[in-house]
Image: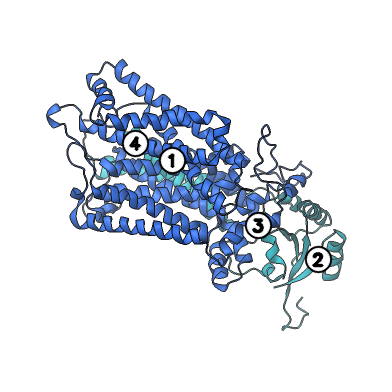
Chain colours: A blue, B cyan
Amino acid sequence: MSGAVQHGGGGPPVIEPGHTYASVTDKISSIVLSRRTPMFWVFGFFASFTLTMVLLYSIGYLLAKGIGIWGVNQPVGWGFAIINFVWWIGIGHAGTLISAILLLLRQEWRTSINRFAEAMTLFAVACAGLFPLLHMGRPWLAYWLLPYPNTMALWPQWRSPLVWDVFAVSTYASVSLLFWFVGMIPDLATLRDRAKRKGFQIFYGMLAMGWRGSALHWYRYETAYLLLAGLATPLVISVHTVVSFDFTIGIIPGWHSTIFPPYFVAGAIYAGFAMVLLLAIPLRKVYGLEDFITMRHLQNMAKILLATGLIVGYGYVIEAFMAWYSANPYEKYMIGNRMRGPYAPIYWSLMLCNIVAPQFLWLKRVRSSPPALFGIAVVVSIGMWLERFVIVVTSLHRDFLPSSWGMYYPTIWDWSTFVGTIGLFLALMFLFIRFLPMISIFEMRTLVPEARQAGMQPVPEHSVAGDEG
Amino acid sequence: MSAQPIHLPRVYGLLAEFERPEELVEAARRAREAGYRKMDAYTPFPIHGLSDALGFRGTKLPLVVLTGGLIGCATALGMQWFSATIHYPLNVGGKPLASWPSFVPITFELTVLFAAVSAVLGMLGMNGLPMPYHPVFNAPRFAFASRDRFFLCIEAGDKLFDTAKTRAFLDSLGAREVVEVEE
């Protein structure tokens, strides 16, 4: 978390000049502590809350009627529920990548985007988690997934990737929550000390747990934070790997493939960075945070988007190549059916969105234009959703026996549940930016020029007393 | 201090305010050289070298995290092995009951989960948090410790502590202001 690492080769700065410890603190905390709630917040929250109500209504109807209200049936039993699950959980991955992996790689530009990217992770995982639960048919028995002593003397099936998924996703949600909260403790103390209203003082005071910025506390805090980052790094890779196991452990054509884990992880980061851009571009604009979320951040994210987009593109090519090279008739038919079958328009739209669209990011002009980046991020988000649609539906709807082929058409309830989770995600995001600091204040302090002059980077060993690390 | 009348608040220590982190690190180093041991610094962000200057030696936190991880690993493996071979053996296609490769994902996840929870609880526990009350918050300008000021507190419990002498010492370090913190 040290500041003052030299900027790699020029380009825009990670924080605009002229800021001090105090200005950074006041600017970010005023967003939360200001009495006036901005109009766009009210409208945005109202709109997303309405969609959340649509979600609740859809869930209520689902609980009353059962999953027959969805388009799923034989042979396509997974449908939107699994498509949306994989899409949402993938989006979450960018948050952990930014907060953990970029921290370990000492990428100081992560500082101003890590907090809300982590919040995005949490909310995306919350949306993702809903789908498998609702898809079970009897969600009130969801606790059967957990190993607990029960009168039926039953255990989960340890050899099933679906059970691995339960552990992977719940661990991911828990660790992301811990990481996010621990990262926020010093900032909550800042808000506690800045808040004027009694209610806010108590609210932030309880959350800050009496943090007082003691040097010894900071020392243990940084150790814990680094260890959490080290733990979250393999975790995030394992989560989407396990999600891909849901597919690869099966023998369905198009699923039973060793490329899935790396290609799923790259796809997750790809979709996630698109979502970070979708959130960061409007946020910096409406809250006037261009000083903190600079063009440097947008450009770096665009580069990661391009790189992961190329990995995903490689995955598509290898999928098609292996289907041909394997000489397996079912695999061959599967890829031909994707390209020319009834879902071919979706397959080709996916190629357009995920392979063609990011190529514009090679141009520096596109990388430096927030509207263009926003547009590409929208296209990539749609593309990643289509990818999961193609994987789930085209493999299931025509597998081995032509007599059991069929078509899958989503119903209005599939759509309302999906759109509803977008509302839930945005509503949680709106609440987050109103009540919690969306940029890590204490880490921003280490980036201001004062801290750089003071040499806040690992200080020369002037003392023999201590042995850090 | 036992000589003081009972109704007077007891002194927790002397709190010196600095404007720049490097002044604080220097002050902490000089205070330690002068023989003070019971002291702490309060800063708005982690300052490398400050813990050295105050004479802190390492932390056992990594050990706690390792232990947590090992417990998680053992719990997961033990649970799966016990249920698959003893409590509910299920023959699937003649495969071995203790099919350990299938146990790897859950073992990994629980290792990470237990280690992460130990890291957070260990850090909070060692730091004594949550702590609803602490005397340093009585200092009027202490709220700036979470904004842009850097504080050094020499506690009254220190052997060398003497209100007048310690105050003079802190003044000599270039403190912007030195205040007495009540217990």
Q: How many marks?
A: 4
Mark 4 highlights which residue?
Answer: A386
Q: Quadrant of residue A397?
A: top left
Q: Chain of mark 1?
A: A
Q: Is residue A329 left or right of residue B109?
A: left
Q: Residue at x 66, y 33 (%)?
A: A8
The residue wearing badge 2 is B177
Whether B111 is drawn above or below B56: the answer is above
Residue A210, position as x, y percentages in the image: 59, 64
Q: Nearer the viewer, mark 2 or mark 3?
A: 3
Q: CA distance from mark 4 to mark 2?
A: 63 Å
Quadrant location of the C terminus of chain A in the rendered image: top right
Most foreground residue, A289 or A120: A289
Work out how far the residue at label 3 is from the one at label 4, CA to CA, in angstroms: 42 Å
Q: Which mark is residue A397?
A: none
Q: Nearer the viewer, mark 3 or mark 4?
A: 4
From the image, which quarter does the N terminus of chain A lie in?
top right
Q: Chain of mark 4?
A: A
Label 1: which residue?
Answer: A378
- Amino acid at the residue labelled 2: Glu
Q: Chain of mark 3?
A: A
Could you give the CA–CA distance between mark 2 and mark 1, rounded to whole angstroms? Answer: 54 Å
Instruction: Identify the secondary structure beneath mark 2.
Output: strand
